[in-house]
Image: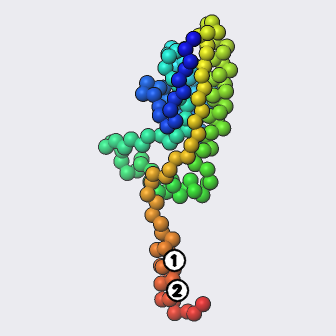
């Protein structure tokens, strides 16, 4: 029996099937999708993650349908946790259900072998956030000076 190779940290196989777990999706749908993939593709890896979705802007999108990323960034800071972080407990639940249900599928025990590799990390902020604290402080000081009041 061949020993499976451990994937390198930060790398994903090109032919891996990815399922993105979000805070608002249905667990039952993700589990059904994953089990269907595992039944049909026994030698391809399945990757479940909570990473942000790819933002593909198409020319058809008008300004009304595209959300402002700076607004979303400030909303996320006010809420505390990012959607990727808040979806981690759901991801763990989905993985555990998939493992439990995969064992129950028809077939020999040799065909129902899963290898689980976990990877956790921190993503760097790729958006450029404008630091307005210096500008705001200067503007407030200027307005205070123009009011003509002391203290």
Q: Which of 107 and 64 is in front in this view?
A: 107
Residue 137 shows which numbered tag? 1
Which quadrant: the C terminus?
bottom right
Residue projecting furthest to the top: 108
In the rendered image, which residue does mark 2 sit on? 144
Give the percent coordinates (x, y) of residue 53: 47, 40
The answer to whether marks 2 and 1 mark residues whose Cβ atoms lie closer than 8 Å is no
Choose the circle earlier in sequence order: 2 or 1: 1
- Give me the residue at 67% from left, 13% from top: 104
Give the percent coordinates (x, y) of residue 122: 55, 46
- Give me the residue at 64% from left, 35% from top: 90
- Give me the residue at 43% from left, 57% from top: 128
Decide if residue 77 is on the left or right side of residue 143: right
Residue 100 shows which numbered tag? none
Which quadrant: the N terminus?
top right
CA gap, disc 2 to disc 1?
Answer: 11 Å
Q: Which of 100 and 139 is in front in this view?
A: 100
Alpha-carbon neighbours of circle 2 within 10 Å: few (<14), some, or many (≥20)?
Answer: few
Q: Which quadrant of the figure has residue 58?
A: top left
Q: Is residue 59 above or below residue 12?
A: below
Specify whether residue 36 is in view: no
Give the percent coordinates (x, y) of residue 17: 48, 26
Secondary structure state at the residue bearing disc 1? helix
Give the percent coordinates (x, y) of residue 66: 41, 48
Q: Which of 109 and 36 is in front in this view?
A: 109
- Give me the residue at 54% from left, 27% from top: 6
Q: How many labels does the image show?
A: 2
Q: Is residue 135 above or below residue 10?
A: below
């Amino acid at each position: 029996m061949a020993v499976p190779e451990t994937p390198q940290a930060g790398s994903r196989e090109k032919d891996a099937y990815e399922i993105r777990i979000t805070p608002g999706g249905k667990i039952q749908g993700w589990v059904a999708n994953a089990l269907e993939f595992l039944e049909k593709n026994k030698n391809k890896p399945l990757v479940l993650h909570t990473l942000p979705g790819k933002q593909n802007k198409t020319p058809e999108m008008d300004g009304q349908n595209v959300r402002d990323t700076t607004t979303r960034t400030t909303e996320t800071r006010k809420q505390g946790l990012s959607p990727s972080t808040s979806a981690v407990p759901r991801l763990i639940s989905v993985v555990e259900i998939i493992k439990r249900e995969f064992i129950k599928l028809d077939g020999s025990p040799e065909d129902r072998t899963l290898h689980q590799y976990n990877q956790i990390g921190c993503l760097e902020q790729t958006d450029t956030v404008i630091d307005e604290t210096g500008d705001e402080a200067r503007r407030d000081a200027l307005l205070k000076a123009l009011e003509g009041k002391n203290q």
